[in-house]
Image (cartoon, rainbow, N blue to C red):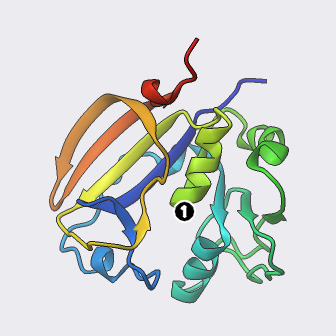
Amino acid sequence: MLVPRTVYYTATTLDGFIADPNDSLEWLLRQTGEPPDDGFIDGVGAMVMGATTYEWVLRNLDGPWPYEVPAWVMTHRRLSPPEVGKDGKTPDIRFAKGSVSDHYFEMCTATGDRDLWVMGGGDLAGQFADEGLLDEIITFTAPVVLGKGRPLLPRRLDLELLDVGRSDPFVIARHRVIGPLLEDSPAE
């Protein structure tokens, strides 16, 4: 089996928050520009998100479930799936408990030869990083400073910058995850 890339693809504020303290994305929704269609979504074979992200998507849907790929929702709560997807069928949504590594093989199998998208949130992406399962982080940084809120990625990681670009009003950066900060490694 070809192992897909596991990619955390998200918007963030300049000071590193993905949502305000009330889990609002109003700061993002009021941006005058749209992130460009960079083909990322077309390369996704499966996705994973936390319960807060899932509930936000459901609350803000303007129509049926927008994703056609299998989706895992990491949660300890009882949640219900939406009844219909954009293809008119019941969406393939799998509610999962436990660690991300418990479900990683199944997620990778579902991707085919495409990417696994860690849609949100930051702590979930951090869980993938903790297990050494997060390959890349792609961020769309908006010209907004919140001061506090849900952090982009509450982990200490070394990254390698692979690409940087701009699409008004966003700065787009793509990083490879190297691993925990070198200074956090145990002394030999």
The answer to whether residue 80 is seen in the rendering is: yes
x 27%, y 65%: residue: 34
Residue placed farthest to the front in the image? 187
- x%, y% of residue 133? 64, 35
Quadrant hosting residue 80 = bottom right
125 on left or right of 164: right
107 on left or right of 179: right
Q: Amino acid at mark 1?
A: Gly
- x%, y% of residue 101? 78, 42
- x%, y% of residue 180? 51, 31
Residue placed farthest to the top in the image? 188
Quadrant hosting residue 168 = bottom left
Tell which of 46 and 123 is nearer to you.
123
x 41%, y 31%: residue: 158
The vertical placement of 123 against 40, above or below, is: below
- Label 1 secondary element: loop
Q: How many marks?
A: 1
Tell which of 157 and 125 is nearer to you.
157
The vertical placement of 65 against 127, above or below, is: below
Tell which of 185 and 14 is nearer to you.
185
Tell which of 151 and 167 is nearer to you.
151
The vertical placement of 159 against 53, above or below, is: above
- x%, y% of residue 47? 65, 54
The vertical placement of 169 against 37, above or below, is: below
The answer to whether residue 115 is seen in the rendering is: no
Quadrant for the C terminus, please.
Answer: top right
x 35%, y 38%: residue: 174
Quadrant for the N terminus, please.
Answer: top right
The residue pinned by badge 1 equals 121
